[in-house]
Amino acid sequence: MRALSLPALHRLAHLAPLALRLGLGIVFVVHGVSKLNGGPATGFGGMLTGLGVGAPALFAWLVTIAELVGGVLLLIGLLTRLATLPLIATLIGAIILVKADLGVIAGMGSPMPGAELDIALLAGLVALLFIGPGMLSVDRMLGLESAPVRENEPVSARL
């Protein structure tokens, strides 16, 4: 049996990290900017207060900064792997604190969506953490990330 293969797409595989970075970066920047409306301590902090989170104003600012700064870093591909870490922590916190009672898909009439978007974003961030920023990134231009090792590449070619 022959595996389904799309050779034309193999030549574009190096663009996958860029697509992940741009998609995730846009989402996080937009979410961070939306938390600035009314001030993070008031709007988003009010929601955290309602959830019983201690120091809600502090956490509101930390999440807002993580989303804004992390999103911009993902967009340009700078410190990419490092930028994923606070965003991963933020999503895990959101899933546990906010979405656990709602489930993956919230029921009809729920005031908030379920955890499906959070899970998808988390998967994308973990993928970026593992594969890195890709060749079209500031990380690569500055030499902060090297080219990935190819699975079939001989060890002598990596030296």
Image (cartoon, rainbow, N blue to C red):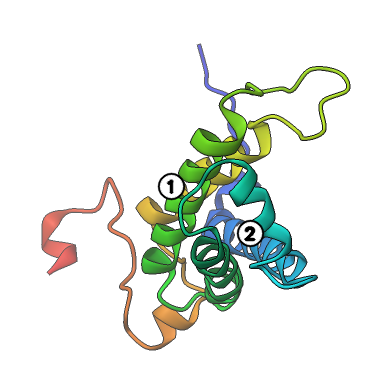
**x and y percent of residue 106 in the render?**
74, 23
Q: Is residue 100 above or below residue 80?
A: above
Residue 113 is labelled as none
Q: Could you say which is closer to the camera, residue 15 or residue 19?
A: 19
Q: Mark 2 sits on what residue?
A: 45
Determine whether, in the image, residue 140 is placed left or right of residue 87: left
Q: Could you say which is closer to the camera, residue 90 or residue 38?
A: 38
**x and y percent of residue 145 in the render?**
33, 74
Q: CA distance from mark 2 to mark 1?
A: 27 Å
Q: Could you say which is closer to the camera, residue 15 or residue 35?
A: 35
Name of the residue lying farthest toward the right: 109
Element assignment for label 1:
helix
Tell me the quarter of the image containing the C terminus: bottom left
Residue depth check, mark 2 versus mark 1: number of the one nearer the observer: 2
Q: Residue at x 45, y 47 (%)?
A: 127
Q: Residue at x 66, y 24 (%)?
A: 102
Three-letter amino acid code at the position of disc 1 = Val
Image quadrant assignment for residue 144:
bottom left
Residue 126 is labelled as 1
Element assignment for label 2:
helix
Crowd around label 2: few <14 · some 14–19 · many ≥20 (10 Å): many
Q: Residue at x 55, y 76 (%)?
A: 69
Crowd around label 1: few <14 · some 14–19 · many ≥20 (10 Å): some
**x and y percent of residue 28 in the render?**
64, 62
Looking at the image, tell me whether mark 2 or mark 1 is earlier in sequence order. Answer: 2
Three-letter amino acid code at the position of disc 2 = Gly
Q: Is residue 70 above or below residue 10?
A: below
Q: Are marks 2 and 1 in contact (CB under 8 Å)?
A: no
Image quadrant assignment for residue 76:
bottom right
Q: Is residue 143 above or below residue 155?
A: below
Q: Is residue 58 above or below residue 3?
A: below
